[in-house]
Image (cartoon, coloured by chain):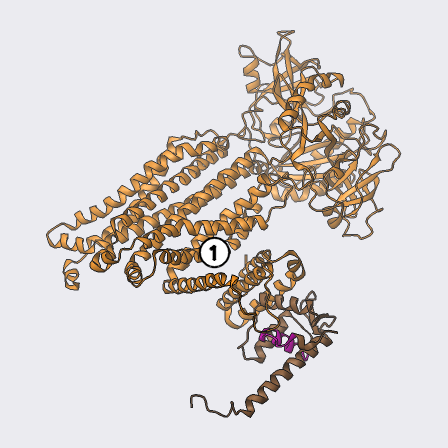
């Protein structure tokens, strides 16, 4: 980010200190003026001028905003202030003490600008990353949904007792049964997320929308931006096609049309009248929902689009706890399911909490939060060390001041004020770091990982308060040791023995040693975490996907009802598309069907094998891929036994995965055997295919996939009227392998429209890209952990180096005398290295023990790596010992080169 | 009608801002530049201070937003400010007060003495 943008953004952030009215009135103006002033400075004095102007402007904006918050703007009239009365005298004295302390502290900091600069910068880094991670956690996990009574929302899901399978979405009958349970829930609403074809001015486009029961939007308690939400009576037959659109849709598709209410838009080739616009904050049920279509389950419209199933979204009655509701839902589930005609064994449970982001994402965020907290602790330990070394050189100063009558309290207070200044400055700069870190992290976040967060992710007041608090806390953490030391400065001791004053007391030396040990231990925990993520990521990347993904491209198209009601016409189109794609330059093969890791159908149920009639397996969850003749050759999935699908394949033919065949036919050849899902049609196994991996590479599920023919069998029933009047009757996926996938992807859209312009192109994507998306979360966590761990390592090394250097400086005289008395330089070097090894060793032992305990929380994030993985541990130990050795080497060499003669001459 | 003298004496900052708008309508940065140029950089108003002061002056109705836009403005969103009649009266009253003060100083020949003498 250019410096100027950073300055502008920081000024916006700082303005949050001001009252809202001031901020809203002046934000644009302030930013424009800061920009103009900074540009001016840059034009006149270059980057340095820009940096200086930026700093002074930001200080001014921050200070003025804070003063405006306190109601203390600049004075207009310069009249004499009223004489202070008695009660304000204490305040005035406090104020003057504070001003005095501040002045003293600033002077002291200016005396050592490098030390102060390093302290402020490292602290800004630590506080910034903490604030960034905090604001993500805050908006996704900590903060309740931005809706009325959000803590009482629940979802009721299906529960398959045999398989323990929990899934959302009720049939209309089941939903209506549940809607009578008014003693548990005082509001019972539902939704279904669906894609719609939006007929916009730029052609047909697939957009995500949702069916909602008429009361669902108003229940959230967020008033509409314009118009109204749905009311009773909407979403029935004959009420017209009504629609509420999101702020995003109103902005992007309707150009913020002020006369939007009453306007008609085309969805699935039907006209819908807009009755309301929802504000940007209303992200229901997902952030991607662009509009809402009403649907009344008690009297659904006989024509028009229908939801596939309806997710029950309800508000607990006042006084009913989550646990009570859960127990009641589980208890009433079977009877209600039976009454609604659901399959046997079906019950219900409260669904995963409405607010949860993906569980692994949440766990990842916590792990990252822990990592940045550790990083900040390391930074604090380092700074404490740094300021200790300064305090020691000032011990005499302290001693003299104490002898002149400065109380111990005054000395401690002054030292603390100095550190709080560093802490607060660090926190202010940390805001800028947090902006950057947040931008970067959100850009790398896997799409969809945060869709359910619903709260906007930014540096809001809470995050800023957190940052400020962190700055002060950090200042106390690294300021207390030196302050404590200042309080102990004995006058007589310091003045009597000058050499003691510069070598520091044994207590100080011990304290500094402890700080280094703590740093090393914390760094080890970070390193172990990063090493585990790295090992896990490497293993994930090496997972055999089961087929060659290179150059593989998928093209997903929606076939409109208009022209493709007959399944055979869909097959004809598929053939035409495959033939046309094959002709593209550089395309080596083309076929149709689902391909991992993209969505397959999921089927679940108990299996029955023809060889053992009447015996049912446990409930199985099986992914199904539909495959076109020639699919296996084109995709590169090997056929181990039997054959692939051929043209005119009967619908009952099925090809199973190797693991499926091994599990159910351990003794014999699976080909030719028959099985079925309970009470379903029999299927005949015609082939056994090699294993492929699904979407969740680290998921053990889904290795039992099987394949079913995509092509309609000869003599299949001709045109069946569709059950639901939807614009799209079927989605199909064309697969192509190309020498240059990106070039092929550019052409694919055109190819589809050359064959039939009515066909909707949903998406074009490379399979490698889809697999990369599946790895986005572990990759992000690995990247961030590695960055934090490396920083931790460098800081710990710097701490060790500092302490050892100081040790050598302190003991120069002793070393000189030893050398003069005949000690070999090697022995002296060994002594210094020995100190380094002792400190590192202690940190190592503590760190490894702590790591073994702490990284256990990462277990669910790891793939095929134990959290006590010895390889990772060994790696960390080696890296750390090598780093410690490198950090000790310089001070040791300096000790070895001490010239005793010159040293003695100095005396 | 508010008595302009009720605002006296003005703080130097308030006086500078009012003075900068005496001959032309300006936007925020224009005020900063005008004051800096006129005083050879001795008085340098920072952004935060400026807008809290402008807010004060608007609240007291000494300033108001102006419709004025120069032909070649690079940023249309900028707000311009101008003195209200009250603002002009206050500026004049303060100037008169200082003029009187300086007159007294002159009579006592404060300026004739050589510094350090």
Output the letter for the chain in brown.
Answer: B
Where residue A685 appears, as percent x and y from the top left, is: 63, 16
Describe residue A560's horizontal placement relative to residue A804 as left or right.
right
Q: Can residue A645 be seen in this view?
A: no
Furthest toward the left, the residue is A821
Say whether residue A793 is magenta. Answer: no
Left-right relation of A459 to A715: left
Rendering coords of residue A803 (x, y %): 30, 50
Determine the secondary structure under disc 1. Answer: helix
Q: Residue at x 79, y 52 (%)?
A: A257
Q: Where is residue A700 in the image (x, y as percent from the top left)?
A: 54, 25
Residue that label 1 marks: A424
**Farthest residue, direction front:** A86
Neighbourhood count class around disc 1 (C-alpha, 10 Å): few under 14, some 14–19, many 20 upward: many
Residue interval drawn in magenta: B7-23
Chain identity for the colour orange used in the image: A
Using the image, name the chain to which the residue with label 1 belongs. A
Compared to residue A39, the image places residue A599 above or below, namely: above
Quarter holding the N terminus of chain A? Answer: bottom right
User: Is A100 in front, or is A630?
Assistant: A100
Q: Quadrant of the C terminus of chain A?
A: bottom left
Q: Nearer the viewer, residue A753 or A723?
A: A723
Q: Does the magenta stretch include residue B14?
A: yes
């Amino acid at each position: 980010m250019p410096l100027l943008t950073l300055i502008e953004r920081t000024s916006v952030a700082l303005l949050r200190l001001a009252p809202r009215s001031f901020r809203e009135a002046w934000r644009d103006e302030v930013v424009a003026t800061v920009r103009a002033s900074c540009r001016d400075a840059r034009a006149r004095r270059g980057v340095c001028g820009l940096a200086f102007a930026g700093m002074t402007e930001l200080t001014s904006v921050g200070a003025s905003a804070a003063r405006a918050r306190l109601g203390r703007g600049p004075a207009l009239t310069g009249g004499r202030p009223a004489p202070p009365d008695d009660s304000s005298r204490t305040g005035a004295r406090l104020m003057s003490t504070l001003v005095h302390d501040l002045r003293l502290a600033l002077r002291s900091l200016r005396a050592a600008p490098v030390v102060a600069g390093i302290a402020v910068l490292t602290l800004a880094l630590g506080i910034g990353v903490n604030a960034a991670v905090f604001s993500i956690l805050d908006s996704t996990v900590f903060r309740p949904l931005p809706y009325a009574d959000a803590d009482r929302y629940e979802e009721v899901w299906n529960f398959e007792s045999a398989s323990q399978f929990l899934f959302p979405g009720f049939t209309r009958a089941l939903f209506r049964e549940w809607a009578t349970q008014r003693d548990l829930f005082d509001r019972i609403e539902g939704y279904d997320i669906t894609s719609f074809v939006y007929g916009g001015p730029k052609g047909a486009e697939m957009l995500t929308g949702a069916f909602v029961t008429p009361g669902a939007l108003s229940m959230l308690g967020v008033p509409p931006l314009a118009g109204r939400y749905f009311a009773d009576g909407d979403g029935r037959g004959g009420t017209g096609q009504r629609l509420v659109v999101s702020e995003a849709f109103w902005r992007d598709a309707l150009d913020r049309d002020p006369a939007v209410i009453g306007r008609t838009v085309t969805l699935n080739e039907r006209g819908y009248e807009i009755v309301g616009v929802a504000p940007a904050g209303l992200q229901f049920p997902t952030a991607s929902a662009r509009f809402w279509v009403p649907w009344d389950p008690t009297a659904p419209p006989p024509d028009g689009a229908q939801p596939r199933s309806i997710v029950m979204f309800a508000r607990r009655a006042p006084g009913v706890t989550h646990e009570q509701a859960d127990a009641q839902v589980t208890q009433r589930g079977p009877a209600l399911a039976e009454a609604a005609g659901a399959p046997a064994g079906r019950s219900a449970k409260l669904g995963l909490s409405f607010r949860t982001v993906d569980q692994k994402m949440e766990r990842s965020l916590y792990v990252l939060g822990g990592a940045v907290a550790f990083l900040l602790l390391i930074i604090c330990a380092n700074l404490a060390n740094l300021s200790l070394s300064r305090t020691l050189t000032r011990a005499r100063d302290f001693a003299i001041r104490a002898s002149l009558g400065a109380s111990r309290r005054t000395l401690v207070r002054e030292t603390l004020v100095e550190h709080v200044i560093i802490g607060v400055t660090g926190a202010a700069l940390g805001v800028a770091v947090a902006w950057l870190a947040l931008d970067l992290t959100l850009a790398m976040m896997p799409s969809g990982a945060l869709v359910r967060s619903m709260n906007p992710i930014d540096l809001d007041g809470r995050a800023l308060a957190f940052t400020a608090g962190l700055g002060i806390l950090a200042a106390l953490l690294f300021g207390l040791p030196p302050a404590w030391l200042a309080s102990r400065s004995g006058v007589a001791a310091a003045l009597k023995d000058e050499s003691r004053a510069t070598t520091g007391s044994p207590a100080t030396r011990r304290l500094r040693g402890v700080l280094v040990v703590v740093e090393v231990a914390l760094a080890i925990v970070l390193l172990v975490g990063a090493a585990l993520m790295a090992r896990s990521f490497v293993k994930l990347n090496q997972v055999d996907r089961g087929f060659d993904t290179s150059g593989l491209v998928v093209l997903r198209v929606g076939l409109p009802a208009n022209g493709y009601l007959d399944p055979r016409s869909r097959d004809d189109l598929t053939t035409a598309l495959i033939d046309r794609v094959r002709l593209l330059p550089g395309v080596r093969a083309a076929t149709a069907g689902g391909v991992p890791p993209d969505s397959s159908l999921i089927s679940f149920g108990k299996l029955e094998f023809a060889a053992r009639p009447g015996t049912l397996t446990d409930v199985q969850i099986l992914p199904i891929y539909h495959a076109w003749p020639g699919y296996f050759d084109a995709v590169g999935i090997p056929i181990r036994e039997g054959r692939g699908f051929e043209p005119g394949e009967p619908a009952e033919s099925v090809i199973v995965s190797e693991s499926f065949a091994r599990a159910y036919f351990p003794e014999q050849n699976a080909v030719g055997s028959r099985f079925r899902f309970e009470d379903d049609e029999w299927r005949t196994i015609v082939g056994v295919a090699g294993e492929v991996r699904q979407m969740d590479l680290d998921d053990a599920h889904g290795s039992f996939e099987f394949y079913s023919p995509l092509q309609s069998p000869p003599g299949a029933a001709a045109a069946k009227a569709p059950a639901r009047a939807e614009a799209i009757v079927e989605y199909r996926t064309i697969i192509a392998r190309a020498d240059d996938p990106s070039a092929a992807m550019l052409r694919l859209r055109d190819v589809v429209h050359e064959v039939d312009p009515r066909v909707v192109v949903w998406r074009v994507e490379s399979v490698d890209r889809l697999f990369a998306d599946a790895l986005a979360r572990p990759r992000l966590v690995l990247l961030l952990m590695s960055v934090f761990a490396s920083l931790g390592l460098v800081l710990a090394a710097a701490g060790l180096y500092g302490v050892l250097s100081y040790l050598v400086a302190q003991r120069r005289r002793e070393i000189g005398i030893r050398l003069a008395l005949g000690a070999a330089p090697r022995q002296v070097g060994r002594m210094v290295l020995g100190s380094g090894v002792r400190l590192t060793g202690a940190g190592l032992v503590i760190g490894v023990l702590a790591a073994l305990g702490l990284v256990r929380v990462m277990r669910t994030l790891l793939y095929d790596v134990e959290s006590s993985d010895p390889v990772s541990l060994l790696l960390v130990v080696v890296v750390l010992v090598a780093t410690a050795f490198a950090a000790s080497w310089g001070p040791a060499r300096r000790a070895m080169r001490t010239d005793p003669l010159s040293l003695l001459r100095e005396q | 009608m508010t008595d302009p003298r009720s605002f006296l004496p003005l703080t130097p900052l308030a006086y500078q801002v009012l003075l900068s708008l005496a001959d032309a309508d300006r936007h925020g940065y224009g005020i900063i530049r005008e004051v800096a140029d006129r005083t050879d950089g001795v008085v340098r108003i920072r952004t935060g201070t400026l807008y809290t002061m402008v807010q004060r002056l608007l609240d007291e109705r000494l300033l108001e937003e102006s419709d004025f836009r120069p032909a070649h403005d690079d940023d249309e969103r900028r707000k311009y400010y101008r003195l209200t009649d009250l603002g002009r009266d206050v500026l004049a009253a303060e100037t008169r007060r200082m003029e009187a003060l300086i007159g007294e100083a002159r009579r006592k020949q404060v300026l004739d003495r050589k510094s350090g003498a």
